[in-house]
Amino acid sequence: MQSPPIFTPPVEEEKFDLWIEAGHVEKHYWHDLWRYRELFFILAWRDVAVRYKQTVAGTAWALVQPFLSMVIMTVFFGKLAGLPSVGNAPYAIMVFAAVLPWQFFANAVASSGQSVVTNRDMISKVYFPRIIVPAGSVLVSFVDFLVSLLILAAMMIWYRFPPAWNLLALPAFMVLGAASALGVGLVLTALTVQYRDFRFIVPFIVQFGMFVSPVGYSSSVILDKFGPRVFSLYCLNPLVFVIEGFRWCILGGEFHPLESPMLVSFAVSFFLLAGGIAYFRKTERSFADVI
């Protein structure tokens, strides 16, 4: 006599959407970006761990690099050139308050520009929104930026220069700086995949950008020496708004973000982000073939 069949409760299948259709990448790209958010943090954490784990140089370099830049600019622009500071702030703090956002931008652009080529093995084998890779590099540079803030805090204690209430607006300018860095980084990432010579051009672009940004001096120097027309052209640099806003958060003083030149610098930041995303999306389809 056969035994009655054993009843087993139905097992609920795991829900997973699998789209097989033409144009899936275009139609569901941003949805995929949200679905792969864990990969974004995993890649960023991997790069942070490689830089800081079991090493002293990683942490030390994040502190020494902006500090040495501040010392050199203070000597050349403050002592030798005799350029004025902002308000009653010590010249060293004025410079360092600008070095931090600049170093963040420069490191983010340089690392994101090489990120896709560095991860070529994963890009050519697995599908995921490629924009995750350069965006993760920007996040890693943001960690270096947070570490460098420790020096700024120590300097303000040393000079007995307390921050004003403007410090509350600092996260907004940090987000704007990250948007500018990501926009430029996306363009350079796509160009580096297509033309490998750009890996040699990017460091030169970053170095040149430091001298056309108000890092070692205030942007008011450009306005006083060259007039409003040149200053308007100068404000086409998106970092003018970011650096002066960051400096205003730390030092206080006068900052007029609604003035026309400053609004131009603000608008260029969003234009770079939108243009960088559009160009990256246009070229990323061929990354796996040419990388």
Image: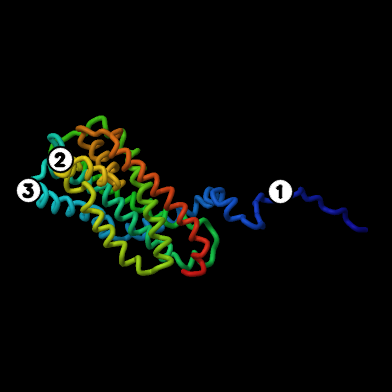
Q: Position of residue 46 (x, y in %)?
A: 41, 58
Helix, strand or loop status at disc 2: helix
Tag 2 and tag 3, C-beta contact below 8 Å: no
Instruction: Tell me the amino acid under the disc marked 2.
Output: Asp
Instruction: Tell me the amino acid under the disc marked 3.
Output: Lys
Residue 154 seen anywhere in this rendered image of the structure: no
The mark closer to the camera, 2 or 3, is 2
Residue 109 seen anywhere in this rendered image of the structure: yes
**Badge 1 is on which residue?**
12
- Residue shown at 36%/60% (left/top)? 50
Side of 71 relative to 37 (left or right): left
Tell me the distance, in whole angstroms, between the alpha carbons under discs 1 and 2: 72 Å
Tag 1 and tag 3, C-beta contact below 8 Å: no
Q: Nearer the viewer, residue 106 or 219?
A: 219
**Badge 3 is on which residue?**
79
Q: Nearer the viewer, residue 201 or 73?
A: 201
Helix, strand or loop status at disc 3: helix
Disc nearer the start of the sequence (1/3): 1
- Residue shown at 41%/56% (left/top)? 186
Q: Is residue 44 above or below residue 117?
A: above
Residue neighbourhood size for the residue with mark 3, other residues' Cα within 10 Å, grouped as few (<14), some (14–19), many (≥20): few
**Badge 2 is on which residue?**
224
